[in-house]
Structures are given as C-alpha cells and as structure tokens.
Image: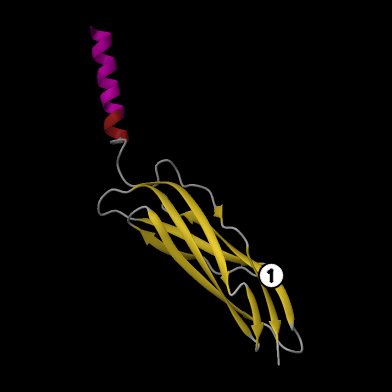
Amino acid sequence: MTRKLAFLCAAAALCAVAGPASAGSMVTGLKDTLTAAPAHYVGHCPGVITFHGVVNVKGRFEPGSSVEIGYQFTRSDGATGQNQFFSVTAPGPHDISETWTLGDLHQLPHFAGWEKFKAWVTDSGQHPPSLGDTYSNEAHFTLECRG
C-alpha cells in the first residue's frame, strides 16, 4: 500500500507541474496555394502581376486564443520578401497577396517567372512544438511588353 501511495503522489506531482494536456490552441497543419493574375500579361510595361495566396490552417483553437502565422514570398529572380505575420483565431483559409511590377519595352520586353511563399507557425508555445515550414506551389506567369 505504501508503494502504491508513493507512486500516486509522484504521478500527481508530475501532472501538477505539466498542467492539463489540452491547454491552449494547437495548429496541426498548414496547406498553401498560390495563383498569378494575370498568368499571361501582354501590354504596356511595366506590368503588374498580382499573386493571390491562401494559407489553410488546420487545428484546434481554444475560445479567445490566437496563433501567429508567418510567411515570406520568394521569386524566380532570387529575390525574397520580408517576413510578414498575421494572427488566426480559428482554423480555415486565410488570404494573402503580393504584387510584382516588372518589364521594359527595350530592356526586358519578355519575361517568364514564378513566385511562391513559405508559411510557418510562430507561436513558440505550440504543443506539440511548431510545425516546420510549408511551401506553396510555384505560381508561373509570362510577360510580354508591347509599345
């Protein structure tokens, strides 16, 4: 009986330190998609390509809590955008966007490229720890400058 009582006391002490297993919100997955509009630009330059992205957040959210999501765009020319952030209070799709202005009738009359983004959970209190980076598809486009 003494052993059983000692074990129960030790287990209770560990549970008190660890806290309840269901505390806080938990993101269990991100799914990222991206499109370019227009996908084929023909016209006066510079032209503007707008990228529309969706970060689909999956998981469990405690009422009144939020989780921070970070994202960063990368382009086919090697440029990367600044890290950007938004907070989510519920699972579901969250829209993001980016524009790329490029092209010159004489110096860059034709261009084919792409843009993509990565997203991640920034909340260091995640249980389990934060998911790794997820990446969108490459949203391809072409540009043709006309005088």
Per the image, is 2 magenta?
Answer: yes
Q: Where is mark 1, residue-wise?
A: 113
Write the residue at 73% across / 89% down.
Answer: 105
Question: Residue 77 appears in which quarter of the rendering?
Answer: bottom right
Question: Residue 114 appears in which quarter of the rendering?
Answer: bottom right
Whole-percent x and y of residue 13? Answer: 27, 27
Exactly how many numbered labels are in the figure? 1
- Residue flagged by tag 1: what amino acid is it? Gly
Per the rendered image, the range of residues in magenta is 1-14
Whole-percent x and y of residue 25? Answer: 33, 47
The residue sitting at the bottom extreme is: 147
Whole-percent x and y of residue 128? Answer: 42, 40
Per the image, is 41 magenta?
Answer: no
Give the image's coloring scheme.
secondary structure
Closer to us: 58 or 123: 58
Whole-percent x and y of residue 8? Answer: 26, 18
Secondary structure of the residue carrying tag 1 is: strand
Write the residue at 58% across / 70% down.
Answer: 36
Write the residue at 76% across / 89% down.
Answer: 106
